[in-house]
Structures are given as structure tokens and as C-alpha cells.
Image: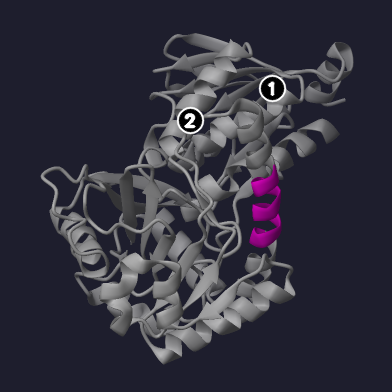
Amino acid sequence: MRLARRLRSERGSSMEVCVMGAGIVGLASAYALRQAGHAVTVVDRGPAGNGASGGNGAQLSYSYVQPLADPSIWRQLPQLLMSTDSPLKLRPRLDPAQWRWGLAFLAACNASTSRASTAALLDLAARSREAFDAMLLRERLDCDFSATGKLVLYPTAEAFAAARRQLALQRALGSAVQHAVSAAECVAIEPALAHYQGRIAGAIHTPSECAADCRKTCDGLHQVLRAQGVRFELGTEVRGFVQRADAVVALVTARGDLPADAFVLALGPQTPRLARQLGLRLPIYPLKGYSVTLPVGQAAAPRVSVTDSARKTVFARLGDRLRVAGMAELVGEDLRIAPERIATLLASTEALFPGCAAVPDPRPWAGLRPATPTGLPIVGRQPGGPSNLWVNSGHGALGFTLAFGTAVQLCEDLGKG
């Protein structure tokens, strides 16, 4: 009998679960596990909410989840490889993992895979919305949450037509109410776009979309979980595993071994490295993104969340701040903040919302989003892996959106043994 199943039988339905990762995915996992009655320990080499959770785009995009792997990538490929200012950047390196991921990503850029991924992401996002809303109602976190909707802007008639086709697909799959709107209707929904109206061919409006500060959410969850008895081992790097038969019995850390009944691997871009120690090869690679956070001041900043599809840039209002985020670079684990990328974000902000970018300190940030080729996160036990190890990683740019949905899925899977 497998060790995890035997331990659960001996202890009842409750287990001691060790979650590796204190970003939004790891913390959401810890929260769901604690709500299910498990004893939980969270381990991370950094503070809670570090990494990609610290400065992401802040949009909770539950209803518009088109994966990055899309058939349109093929005609964009020359620009992605050659252009210095493309929002999507591929820079080939002497890295077999990058090449494997890149080839798998291109293989996923077809209509049938994109449709299947969209359907799965919509279902997962709906579960995530329900779980996040329940947590927020229960814990009343201060995270600058808003539900003012979202506009996705398209610059050309061709791009707008493709967006309407995606809207029709999502509507057939049961997505929330969305509308294709004209440039004038965009300005009626978000008056701060008046200056930019002439450059909008059309937009998709989703009134139900939300935004929140992911870092504040992580900080709040950290406090809530500590109050609920969850143990945190922060500043503690996981170096390896102690294994017995087909199971992990403890984590090896600089502070000593940490035993548990079950283990959750939710370390973002570090997940594949540790998984390899257990004989698992996970198709996860970091996509580098950037953000700036601007004080609103007297400028005409939007209240509705906005996505500029041409620039691959998102704008989200967080109380008296505006988060501007974008870019997707396949450049390995490089966290350097490129000044030209920050300049691009500020130029995009000035183009759409004049005056908002004129600040002395835009608080530049860069983070690594762990992505799979299809855009679907990897959740659950893996074939050939330890019987008591669960993975929850690979959320890409939808980490905040999907975190609570995959946490629920993880708990259900763990409960089945």
C-alpha cells in the first residue's frame, strides 16, 4: 500500500501537508488545504508574495482567457525573433529546456489546441472566481479589490474580427456576458480613453471582470494562515528530498529536514528544477514580464481595467495607483530590469492615458511567470513521480486568476489519495 494512503488511514482524513512556495499559488493552496482540515507548513526561500506575485498585472481575468499559444503566432514569428521592441520576445539560448518548451509551444499554436485550452481555462477560472470571492468575503482582506469590468482594445478591423470570433467561442463554452463594442462605446464605458478613441477599431467589454493587488492579497493570506495555525518556514531554500519506496518523507533544507505526509510543489519557475530530482520532467519555462506602478494623482487614469492587445499591455486600477504590466520574454531566468522595457510601458501609458506616466519613480519591476506550452497549469500527482507529491504550477500570466481554482482542484485530488 502506498505510504500516503497508509498515513491518511492511520491519521483519519487530516494530513500534514508541506507546500513548497509562498507566492499566490502556494498560499492559495495552503488556504484551501487548511480549510479542508489539514495541518499545513509553507516553505519558501523568500518572503510571502515574492516572485511573480509581487508586481503582476493585477487583473483577475476570469472570462477572457485566450491562451498565448494561438494560430496567429505563426505569422508573428519573424517579428518575435527579430524585432527589438516586440512585446513578445524569443531569444534562442544554449538551453535544451528552452528549445523543448519553444517547440512544444509552436506545436500548440493551432486552432484545435487553442479551443481545448480555452474551454479548460474558462472552467478553471469560474471555479477560481467562486473560491476567491468566498475567501475574500470570509477573510475581508485589504487588497484594493474592484469589480469595474474590463475592456480589451483592438487596433485594426482584422484584429477586432478575430476577437469577435474568440468571443463567440467563449460564449458557446458558457463564458460570462461579454460584448463587442465600438470605439465610441469604449469611451462611454471608460471616459479616460477619450484621447485614444481614434486608434481603437473596437473592443471586447466584460462587465464582470475584477482586479486586485496580488502582493497585498499574499500579505493578507500570510497573516490569515498564521492565525489559523499554518507554519511558515520562509527564508528557507528546498535543496532536495528524502525518499522511501515510492514516497517523499521529508524535504531537505539548510535548516534541517522537514517531514510531512504529503507535499505540494508550487515554486513557480523553480518547480522543474526540483521536480527533476524526483525523476519528473515538467514542461514549465519562465516567461519574463515587467510592470510599473504609478500614483494616480490628478491625471485621467482609468477605473475600468484595460488591455491593449497590440502592445500586450494591461492597465489595472488599484485604489490610488495604476498598475501597468506587459511583455512576455522567453529569455531564461533573467530578472534584470531592462530600462527600454520600462520605457515602453511608460510610453504605452502616456499614449492611452496622458499625464499618468509623468512620475519621478514608476516603481519598475520584473518577474518570471512559470508557463506551460498550452497555457494550462499542471495540477495533481504526476505519472512516475512520488505517490504523495502533488504539483500546482505552470499558470503563466493567469497565476492570480487561476490560483484559487487550482487550489480547489488540488484539494479534491489530494482527498482521493
Tell me which residue sits at (43%, 48%) in the image.
58
The amino acid sitting under disc 2 is: Asp
Camera sees residue 316 = yes
Instruction: Determine which of the numbered discs, if any, sits on residue 34 in the image.
Output: 1
Instruction: Determine which of the numbered discs, if any, sits on residue 142 in the image.
Output: 2
| Up/down of 110 relative to 7, above or below | below
The amino acid sitting under disc 1 is: Arg
Tell me which residue sits at (18%, 64%) in the image.
347
Q: Where is residue 49 shown, x and y percent of the image?
A: 43, 31
C-alpha span from label 1 to label 2: 21 Å
Tell me which residue sits at (63%, 67%) in the image.
118
Q: Where is residue 175 shown, x and y percent of the image?
A: 68, 66
| Up/down of 407 relative to 207, above or below | above
Q: Which image quarter: residue 65?
A: bottom right
Left or right: 162, with 287 as reference point? right
Closest to the observer, 172 or 94: 172
Q: Is 128 one of the magenta-colored residues?
A: yes
Tell me which residue sits at (51%, 88%) in the image.
161
For the image shown, how many numbered marks are present on the structure?
2
Please tell me whether mark 2 sits on a helix, a strand or a loop: loop
Front position among marks 1 and 2? 2
